[in-house]
Image: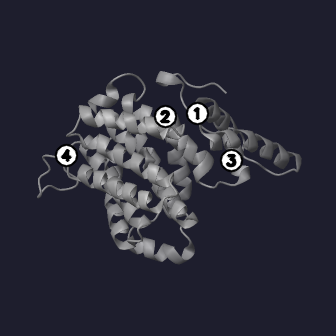
Amino acid sequence: MNEWKRRVRWGLLALAGMTLLAVGSAESRAGECGGLPRQVVDALVNEEIDRAEALVSRWLKKAPKDPLPRVEAAMVKLVKAYHTDDPGRRKRLESEALDQAERATQPLGWQPDAEESDGTLDERLARGYALSLQAVIRYNRHQDRKAYDLGYRGRQLLQSVLDEDPGRADAYLPLGLYEYYLGKLPAERRRGARLLDLTGDADLGIEYLERAVQEAPVVGPEAARVLLVQLGLSDEALCRYRTLASQMHRRYPGNRILGLVARIVPLQCRILESEGEAVAADAGPLLPEPCGRLARR
């Protein structure tokens, strides 16, 4: 179970940014600050999975032909799979997530002879995320060769969108995680990664994630949670995010892990400083206040 959780946790958080797909859609522009996609992210970060699922279900009914909510539906299914200890239920939820991701890759109207790089930025984002999510699920099933192929194609599509429109800050979350995790591969796996053109830069990954926290209208909170919880940063490095940890706990009180981090990180930093250790200055990014008003330290 621990190994399965480790693999799924990597996959979920490397792709939880898939909600950015909706940034360019009509649904996301409804309301303020990311619209319905941001509401889904907020619910998941606050560990309100049932609420997130209800929001996605509502979106699917409104836009049954749109691949974007299908990608979010797949994400929610995979999160639910991670939260169950029943192997049968876990396998079923994972299969449902894979089905949604595959349907998002080839939505209604998709032409068999179309290139993956064809279409609008939103369509390419949807395709890139759907491919990446499929890669995660295949990886969890130990289908490594297929996972690497899907992951490479997904990463290339996402990078092409960011190259064309650097203002799409939500793209920095998944690409930051690609950079970070591929940059942290153990030495024995780096040669194979180079052959597959799946190398990364961990420092660049951190830079991308911090930019997502500050600028991404939809996935900023998830980027913040990843920095605080997912990456396994050293105590000294986490001191850079002391104020961010406090902000996230206030915003998402339902997430017990964030509450624990908000208490432990400042204490650990004070202990390290009292022992004469060099720690990172508390100068990390902060989430904007609702609708773009910058947060104050």
Q: Earlier in the sequence, mark 3 or mark 4?
A: 4
Q: Are marks 1 and 2 in contact (CB under 8 Å)?
A: yes
Secondary structure beneath dot 2 equals helix
Question: Which circle marks residue 252 in the picture?
Answer: 1
**What x and y, as percent, mark residue 15?**
43, 51
Q: What distance separates the C-alpha of mark 2 from that of mark 3? A: 23 Å
Q: Callout 3 environment at 10 Å: few (<14), some (14 to 19), or many (20+)?
A: many
In the image, 271 versus 162, the foreground residue is 271
Q: Nearer the viewer, mark 2 or mark 3?
A: 2
Camera-nearest residue between 4 and 268: 4
- Tag 3: residue type? Leu
- Circle nearer the viewer, 2 or 4: 2
Residue 218 in sight in this render: no
Q: Residue tagged by mark 2?
A: 42
Image coords of residue 32 (percent x, y): 40, 22
Give left or right: position of 208 versus 120. Answer: right
Q: Classify the position of the N terminus by image quarter.
A: bottom right
Distance Cα–Cα, label 3 vs label 4: 40 Å
Kind of residue indicated by mark 4: Gly
User: Of the residues under marks 1 and 2, which one precedes in the sequence?
Assistant: 2
Label 2 vs 3, first from the N-terminus: 2
Image location of residue 48, percent across then percent down: 50, 37
Callout 3–callout 4 Cβ contact below 8 Å = no
Pair 1/3: label in front = 1
Q: Residue at x 45, y 38 (%)?
A: 50
Check disc 4 and report the residue beneath it: 119
